[in-house]
Image: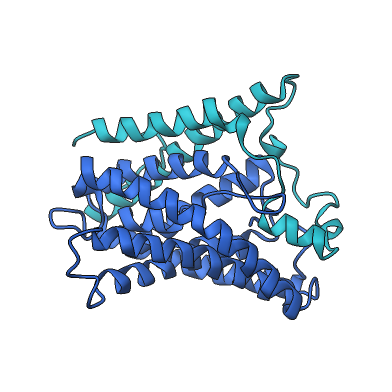
Amino acid sequence: MKLRGMLFGLAAALLIALLLSPFASPWPDGLEKVAADRGFLHKGEGKPVLAAPIPDYAWPGIKSGRLAMRIAGVVGTLVVFIIAWGSAAMLKVKRDGAGHVTRASGHRE
Amino acid sequence: MHIPDGFLATKVWAPLWIVAAGGLWYCIRRVSAELQDRAVPLMGVMAAFIFAAQMLNFPVAGGTSGHLLGGVLAAALLGPWAGAVVISIVLVVQCLLFQDGGITALGANIVNMAIIGSGLSYAIYALTRSAPGIRAMRRPDPIIVAVAVASWCSVVLASAACAFELALSGTSPLRIALPAMVAVHALIGIGEAVITCLVVSSVLKVRPDLVYGVAGGQS
C-alpha cells in the first residue's frame, strides 16, 4: 500500500493543529452568532449534560492559551486518526472473514 | 454549527439520536460491504485532517466565523457511506473530549453534518458531476465543479436542518431561524467550497486514484 500520501495527509493535519489552530478566528460561528442575535444563546450556556475532559480545545492546566490549544489540537487529531483507521481496519477484517475479529484494537498500523 | 445542550427540546433531540443511529448503522453496513484496502488508512487521514481543519475558524462578514465541515471533502474521497462515518467519528470525539456540541444534541449534529452534510450531499455531488453540460467539461474538471456546488449546498442544507430543529424545539421560530441560519451559512459555504476545491484538486493532481469513483479509484 502506498503510505506516503497517507503520511503526508496526516502530517498536514498535525501541522494545522500545531501551527495554525491558535490563530483561528475567535468570532462566534454561524449558529452562535444567530443564537446571540436572536436572544437564545443563554439556553446553551447552562451546565453541559456531560462534562468533557478538554473543554473548548484548551488542554487543562496549561497557562498559555495558545499552547493549550496546540496540545489539544494535536491530541484530538491523533485520537480521531486512530479511531477512524482502527474502525476501518476492523470493518475490513470482519468483511474479509480472514479469521475472526478477536479484539477490537485501534492500532492496526 | 455544533448544537450545544439546551438548544433542542427532548422531543426533538431524542428522535434524532435514533435517526442518527439508524443512519450510521446503514452507512457502516455499506462501508463494510465495499471498503477497499486503500480506503482504510484514508479514513484515518480524512478524519484527522477534517478534525484539524475544523479548528480553523475563518472570519466571514459581521463578526461571525465559520469553519470547514468537510462532509463533501470526505465523501468525494471516500464515498457517501464512509464519508458520513468519518464525519460522525469527528463529531463524537469533539463532543466527548472537547465539549464541542452537546451530548444530547449529538444525534442532531450527526444528522445535520454527517448524514445530510456528507452522505446526502454526495448525491448532489454525483448528480452535478454527471449532469449534461458538466460531464463533458475539460476545464474546470467536472469533479471540481461538482465539489464546489455540493460543498456549498452541504453547509446551507445542514444549517437549514439545524433551523428546523431549533424551531421544532421552540427555541427560535422558523421564520426567524431559517433565514438567519441560511443567510450566514450561505457565506460560510463559500469558504467550505473554496477549501474543499483546493484540497480535492491537489489530491487529483498528486493521487487521482484516491478520489472516489475516478477510474482506477476505489469505487
- Specify the quadrant that holds the N terminus of chain B: bottom right
- Specify the quadrant that holds the C terminus of chain B: bottom left
Q: Is residue B37 visible?
A: no
Identified at 40% across, 32% down, the residue is: A12
Identified at 46% across, 29% down, the residue is: A14
Number of callouts? 0
Chain shown in cyan: A
**From what the image shows, is residue B51 above or below residue B36?**
above
Of B5 and B177, which appears nearest the observer? Answer: B177
Q: Position of residue B113 (x, y in %)?
A: 53, 61
Q: Position of residue B140 (x, y in %)?
A: 25, 58
Residue that extends furthest to the left in the rendered view of this protein: B216
Q: Position of residue B183 (x, y in %)?
A: 63, 67
Chain B, hue in figure: blue
Could you tell whether B96 is left or right of A14 in the image?
Answer: right
Identified at 52% across, 59% down, the residue is: B189
Of B65 and B139, which appears nearest the observer? Answer: B139
Could you tell whether B89 is left or right of B142 in the image?
Answer: right
| Quadrant in the picture for residue B103 | bottom right
Of B155 and B48, which appears nearest the observer? Answer: B155
Could you tell whether B74 is left or right of B40 in the image?
Answer: right
Identified at 40% across, 47% down, the residue is: A87
Residue that extends furthest to the top in the rendered view of this protein: A63
**From what the image shows, is residue B162 above or below residue B212?**
below
